[in-house]
């Protein structure tokens, strides 16, 4: 029995409105699987991903494909009741993060490789992989819009201000980890290792906060959930501020062993093989750290107003 015939048999037994919604969901899921699968398959055949940032793009496509496939299997088998949280809340949050992740891969991968891959089959595969990555971003974004437009109890947390801020914080942190996956950037200096630890702690705590909300456990904390989020934002600001200062000092200040000039980095002299050299990666991490620090500040202001100003 084919997957299509199985879907038809499963949806025929549902009420017409629910069956229509189910078919749309399956159609989006199949497009997501197809686009992410083709993206990493095309790149794998070219061998143009054996770099730090290329590994990040491949990880995104493979991760989205695997999780989407598992989601599709769960929905086909009707096993949503086994999920400890709200299934619809999981879908919308996963689709939101997948939209951002695939969008970042759609930007980072072509920036890294399309300009340096010689014209030919490899170049064509890189172009096609980028196109399928963009298609994946569109399909995940369509799923977010479709779920939020459905008349249901879903509050679309990720599309409200606190959800948007939390999603952006975690997303920027994930992109930072994509750039610091090159361990030679920080393992030589304990202060830089602390920066990576700060990124990890903030990402972990952000994920915990999101799971607490999705799981309905936010009201079971010993303190009010907004106060918990306020404290989390304050802690994250301290960690990111320390990471920004240490990263700038130890990466770009000669007095601390840094390289203030791009020309002093030998890897930046080989533009034919490395579009984003080690110095560029250091700069990108510094910029993203500053960006995330600003987002955490906005998060702090939001929850401070909620806690201290709200009637």
Image (spheres, rainbow, N blue to C red):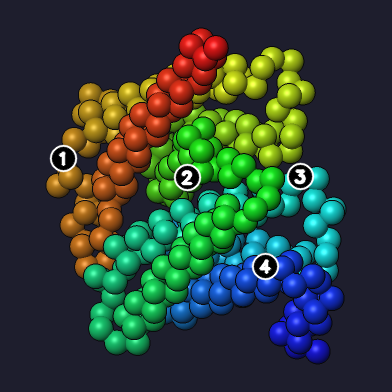
Which of 304 and 180 lies nearest the eye of the viewer?
Answer: 304
> Which residue lies at the image location 21% right of the left edge and 54% below the top edge?
268
Q: Which residue is mark 4?
A: 21
**Residue 249 pos. (x, y %):** 28, 26
Circle 1 — which element?
loop
Q: Earlier in the sequence, mark 3 or mark 2?
A: 3
Which numbered disc covers residue 307?
Answer: none
Observer able to see residue 166: no
Query: Alpha carbon of mark 2 to alpha carbon of mark 4: how far?
Result: 29 Å
Crowding at dot 2, Cα within 10 Å, few <14 / some 14-19 / many 20+, comes out as some
Q: Nearer the viewer, mark 3 or mark 2?
A: 3
Q: Which residue is mark 2?
A: 171
Circle 3 — which element?
loop
Crowding at dot 4, Cα within 10 Å, few <14 / some 14-19 / many 20+, comes out as some
Observer able to see residue 221: yes
> Which residue lies at the image location 40% right of the left edge and 31% below the top edge?
295
Question: Quick check: 309 left or right of 95?
Answer: left
Q: Which residue is mark 3?
A: 85
**Residue 40 pos. (x, y %):** 50, 72
């Amino acid at each position: 029995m084919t997957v299509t015939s199985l879907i038809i048999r499963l949806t025929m037994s549902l009420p017409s409105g629910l069956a229509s919604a189910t078919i749309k969901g399956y159609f989006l899921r199949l497009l997501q699987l197809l686009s992410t699968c083709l993206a990493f398959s095309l790149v794998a055949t070219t061998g143009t991903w054996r770099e730090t940032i290329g590994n990040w793009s491949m990880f995104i496509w493979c991760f989205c494909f695997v999780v989407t496939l598992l989601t599709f299997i769960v929905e086909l088998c009707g096993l949503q009741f086994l999920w400890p949280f709200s299934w619809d809340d999981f879908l919308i949050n996963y689709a939101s993060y997948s939209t951002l992740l695939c969008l970042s891969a759609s930007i980072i991968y072509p920036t890294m490789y399309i300009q340096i891959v010689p014209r030919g089959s490899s170049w064509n595969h890189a172009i096609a992989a980028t196109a399928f990555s963009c298609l994946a971003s569109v399909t995940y974004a369509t799923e977010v819009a479709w779920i939020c437009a459905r008349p249901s109890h879903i509050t679309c947390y990720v599309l409200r201000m606190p959800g948007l801020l939390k999603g952006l914080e975690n997303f920027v942190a994930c992109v930072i980890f994509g750039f610091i996956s090159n361990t030679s950037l920080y393992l030589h200096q304990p202060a830089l290792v602390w920066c990576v630890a700060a990124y990890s702690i903030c990402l972990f705590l952000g994920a915990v906060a999101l799971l607490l909300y999705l799981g309905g456990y936010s009201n079971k904390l010993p303190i009010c959930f907004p106060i918990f989020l306020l404290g989390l934002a304050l802690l994250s600001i301290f960690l990111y501020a320390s990471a920004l200062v240490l990263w700038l000092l130890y990466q770009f200040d000669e007095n601390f062993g840094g390289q203030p000039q791009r020309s002093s980095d030998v890897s930046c002299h080989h533009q034919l093989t490395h579009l984003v050299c080690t110095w560029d990666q250091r700069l990108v991490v510094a910029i993203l750290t500053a960006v995330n620090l600003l987002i955490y500040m906005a998060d702090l202001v939001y929850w401070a107003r909620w806690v201290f100003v709200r009637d």
